[in-house]
Image (cartoon, rainbow, N blue to C red):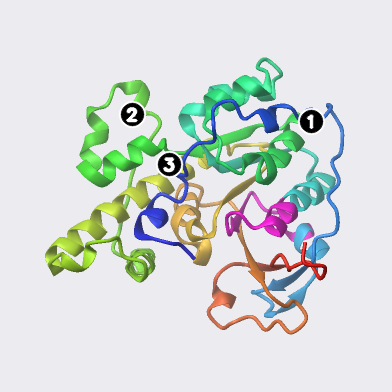
Amino acid sequence: MLGSLLLLLLQSQVPPAPAAAPAAAAQAPVAAGAIVLVSYVPERVFDSRKRKFSDFEAMLADLARADVVFVGEQHDDRNTHRLELALLEGLMRRRGQLTVSLEMFERDAQQTLSAYLAGALPEEEFLKQSRPWPRYATDYRPMVEFAKGHGWPVIASNIPRRLANQVAKEGIGSLDRLPAEERAWAAQAVDCPDDDYRKRFVATINEHPMPGAEKLSEAERKAMDDRFYLAQCVKDETMAEAIAAAHGPGHPLIVHYNGSFHSDFTLGTAARVKRRLKKARVVVVSVLPVDNLDTLKPAKDDRKRADYLVYTLKPQPSPHGR
């Protein structure tokens, strides 16, 4: 799933897009109240609780009854991102007002993001100041514009990448040496237990070791794993804190988009939201691109991955070679 140990640790910490981002800025934002429709997205939905295939509309009807919905994605998959927008459209029809939460924006960009959504900041300036991911224009802009067009809040939920890097290098105590304004961008309460999530994290990063890792002693390797896992926990806690802060009486449904590792098996960010919002109904969706939807049989481990598995079709080569 991830190309290297560092990529797993920092899967939210993708290098920012070029400052000017002229292509994205040139696109006109969605008019207030407009409905953006997506084209057909091949998919199949598996209801893990009922242990059978369902359909997209039945899933949406259930998600609309939740308090928080996690959508775990495989980054940079075209059909996944189209389906994510379709999910927002379907939930809008059922709930009207939503709150969108994104791993892809960091908490120190919230003021800039909110100003853009309110129409107080041009898109070009918003992109210069908010450090969007490189594929923002195609992958996440449609959802932000859809939210903007309907007056929905969008939460910039993630910890700033520099602070996650700092935790990985210097430990959690380094956050308390920050000025109060910067310290507020990371979760106040951080729990990093030696649990199944840690086992999955360490196993995954060890599948893609960093260059030179083979020269480390067992103790050095464990210390490195511990530092990276701590940074991962801080990311999860920070996103969970941001989501929980948006929840309250009469609240709209919160739909949070993140890399699937953060919410699969209801671990990571999902577990930390449930810890903070004990009475909230939290539903986890995991989107899995596959080569063939027609012959699909969910793997046994996948059935434990999420409440709903949404299989999308991997982009296929053009029959005309283009």
- Helix, strand or loop at disc 3? helix
Residue 132, by quadrant, is: top right
**What range is drawn magenta here?**
61-84
Crowding around mark 1 (Cα neighbors within 10 Å: few <14, some 14 to 19, many 20+) is some
Residue tagged 1: 149
In the picture, the quarter occupied by the C terminus is bottom right
From the image, tell me which residue sits under label 3: 238
Amino acid, disc 1: Gly
Relative to 4, is 159 above or below?
above
Residue located at (64% from left, 58% from top): 77
Does the magenta run of residues contain 139? no
Rendering coords of residue 288 (x, y %): 63, 67
The kind of residue tagged 3 is Thr
Q: Rate crowding at label 2 as few (under 14), some (14 to 19) or many (20 or more) other CA atoms within 10 Å.
A: some
Label 3 vs label 1: CA separation? 27 Å
In 3D space, how far apart are the residues under numbered discs 2 and 1 (Cα atoms)? 32 Å
Front label number (2 vs 1): 1
The mark nearer the N terminus, 2 or 1, is 1
- From the viewer's perspective, is 204 left or right of 81? left
Point 66% across, 37% down: residue: 251
Number of numbered discs: 3
Quick one: SS at disc 2?
A: helix
Circle 2: residue type: Arg
How far across and how far down the image is residue 292, in percent?
Answer: 72, 78
Label 1 element class = helix
- Residue drawn at x 78%, y 52% as measured from the top left: 86
Q: Earlier in the sequence, mark 3 or mark 1?
A: 1
The x and y percentages for residue 70 are 60, 54
Comparing marks 3 and 1, which lies closer to the viewer? Answer: 1
Indicate which disc residue 183 carries: 2
